């Protein structure tokens, strides 16, 4: 009992002693700077000076400000490493941006007590800076547009004025009037301009990587830029047709179709969608019947099926087996729900076929339905190196979770890798596309952000 009562007091004493020691070290280091005979450019001494300066600046703050910073540090420590990294990046950007503002504008922002009002002020300031960088024609167009949505009285007058239009034109005029009155036209216009600007910047970034090919003085020596699936080789074309397109949504397929024939838009869109749909992970869309699966997969299943039933005529074809097993289908649905993936018909079929082939020790290309490290491509094997950055970030419990997921197979194993990578801010280099025939058009050249080695 006495021992328990003394523990808080003992912790207080230790904290007090630690504070005295830290203060003594800081004073000693600071006083030693004036007697230091080493070169001032020593990076270790520079880092120490910076730390001392930051410590002095922190202790010079008012007590309430110090407490707020301690609370911020505590809140950041409770986040996952990935979330913390994103917020730290945002805070550094905001601090740099705020330092560049005129003192009057900076004080006006900092003196706004309400958080929502301050955020609105920052957004308005950023919008003004963006408009100031635009061509005069764009600035004049935005200046003529009203801010915010139209006043209800104006909308009412517009609807009344619609009666003056011919009867056969009233439905179109009504729809246009209601649409314009229901949105902030200026904000939507700015949004579209920014989207177009982002796309242009991305296209120029990619084009700069192929500048010698695009600017050769001799037109005959300029290499033709790939703008169709077949331009990257038969392996890429077959992969897009049999594996990637079935995993895309309708809107994504339309995006890819619209980009085809245009360089660099087509390869940029292709790489973006392929990175978004690695075949190692379960997909919402895809083949929903056995016959719709890629021929390579159906051939492997059929070969194993015929070997299994070599003693006699099989009672049912493999397609019937995979599509009429309610008990197994329920099991696969529950497994997919546990890993937080929608148990669609395509995902359940993939689960059934994948588990059947894994039981038969069959391997599949392109990391399709990877259930163990041997099913992964070399970049992913390197990513899972026990001594590598990702695995070194995991604690013992998380390593055990990954081992247990590997025992359960697909889809638990790749999904667990994805979730842990998201938690710690890593981007797994899943297989996305076969390498193109021309090495100059390596897929990383079409990514705005290169994959880490």
Image (spheres, helix red, strand yellow):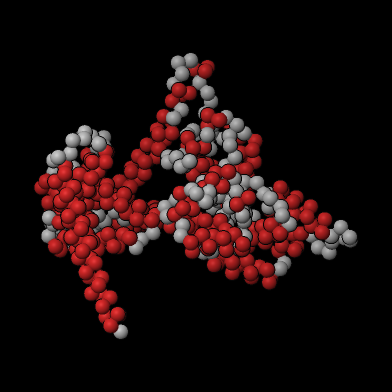
Q: Quadrant of residue 42?
A: top left
Residue furthest bottom as drawn: 1
Residue drawn at x 52%, y 32% is 441
Q: From the top left corner, tell me how far across and down residue 139 is, in percent.
A: 24, 39
**Figure label count:** 0
Q: Split into 4 quadrants, where in the image is the N terminus?
A: bottom left
Q: State the residue in front, 379 or 294.
A: 379
Residue furthest top as drawn: 218
Residue drawn at x 20%, y 58% is 21
Residue furthest right as drawn: 312
Residue 149 located left or right of residue 409: left
Residue 235 located left or right of residue 211: right
Q: From the top left corner, tell me how far across and down residue 335 is, in percent.
A: 59, 66
Whether residue 117 is visible: no
Whether residue 95 is visible: yes
Residue furthest left as drawn: 104
Q: From the top left corner, tell me how far across and down residue 124 is, in percent.
A: 22, 50
Residue drawn at x 26%, y 78% is 6
Residue 390 located left or right of residue 407: left
Q: In which quarter of the image is residue 410?
A: bottom right
Q: State the residue in front, 414 or 11.
A: 11
Residue drawn at x 59%, y 69% is 334
Q: From the top left corner, tell me how far across and down residue 338 is, in percent.
A: 54, 67
């Amino acid at each position: 009992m006495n021992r328990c009562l003394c523990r808080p007091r003992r912790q207080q004493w230790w904290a007090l002693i630690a504070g005295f020691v830290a203060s003594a070290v800081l004073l000693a280091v600071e006083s030693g700077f004036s007697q230091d005979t080493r070169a001032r450019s020593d990076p270790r001494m520079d880092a120490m000076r910076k730390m001392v300066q930051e410590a002095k600046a922190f202790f010079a703050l008012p007590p309430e400000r110090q407490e707020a910073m301690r609370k911020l540090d505590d809140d950041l420590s409770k986040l996952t490493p990935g979330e913390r990294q994103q917020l730290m990046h945002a805070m550094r950007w905001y601090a740099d941006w705020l330092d560049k503002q005129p003192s009057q504008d900076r004080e006006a922002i900092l003196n706004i007590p309400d958080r929502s009002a301050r955020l609105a002020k920052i957004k308005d300031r950023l919008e003004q800076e963006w408009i100031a960088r635009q061509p005069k024609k764009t600035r004049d167009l935005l200046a003529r547009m009203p801010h915010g949505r139209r006043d209800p009285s104006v909308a009412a007058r517009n609807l009344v004025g619609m009666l003056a239009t011919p009867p056969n034109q009233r439905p179109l005029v009504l729809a246009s009037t209601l649409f314009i009155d229901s949105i902030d036209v200026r904000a939507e216009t700015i949004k579209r301009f920014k989207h177009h600007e982002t796309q242009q910047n991305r296209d120029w970034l990619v084009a700069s990587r192929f500048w010698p090919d695009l600017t050769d003085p001799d037109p005959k020596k300029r290499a033709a830029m790939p703008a169709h699936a077949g331009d990257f080789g038969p392996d890429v074309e077959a992969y897009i047709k049999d594996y990637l397109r079935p995993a895309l949504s309708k809107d994504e397929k339309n995006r890819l179709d619209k980009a085809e024939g245009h360089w660099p838009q087509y390869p940029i869109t292709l790489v973006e969608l392929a990175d978004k749909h690695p075949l190692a992970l379960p997909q919402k869309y895809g083949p929903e019947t056995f016959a719709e699966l890629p021929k390579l997969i159906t051939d492997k299943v059929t070969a194993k099926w015929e070997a299994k039933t070599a003693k006699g005529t099989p009672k049912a074809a493999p397609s019937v087996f995979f599509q009429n097993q309610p008990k197994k289908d329920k099991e696969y649905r529950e497994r997919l729900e546990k890993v937080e993936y929608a148990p669609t018909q395509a995902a359940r079929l993939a689960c059934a076929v994948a588990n059947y082939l894994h039981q038969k020790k069959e391997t599949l290309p392109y990391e399709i339905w990877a259930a163990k490290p041997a099913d992964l491509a070399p970049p992913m094997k390197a990513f899972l190196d026990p001594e590598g950055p990702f695995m070194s970030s995991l604690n013992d419990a998380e390593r055990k979770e990954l081992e247990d997921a590997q025992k359960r197979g697909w889809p638990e194993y790749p999904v667990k890798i994805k979730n842990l990578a998201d938690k710690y801010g890593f981007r797994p280099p899943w297989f996305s596309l076969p390498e193109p025939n021309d090495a100059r058009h390596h897929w990383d050249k079409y990514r705005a952000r290169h994959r880490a080695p």
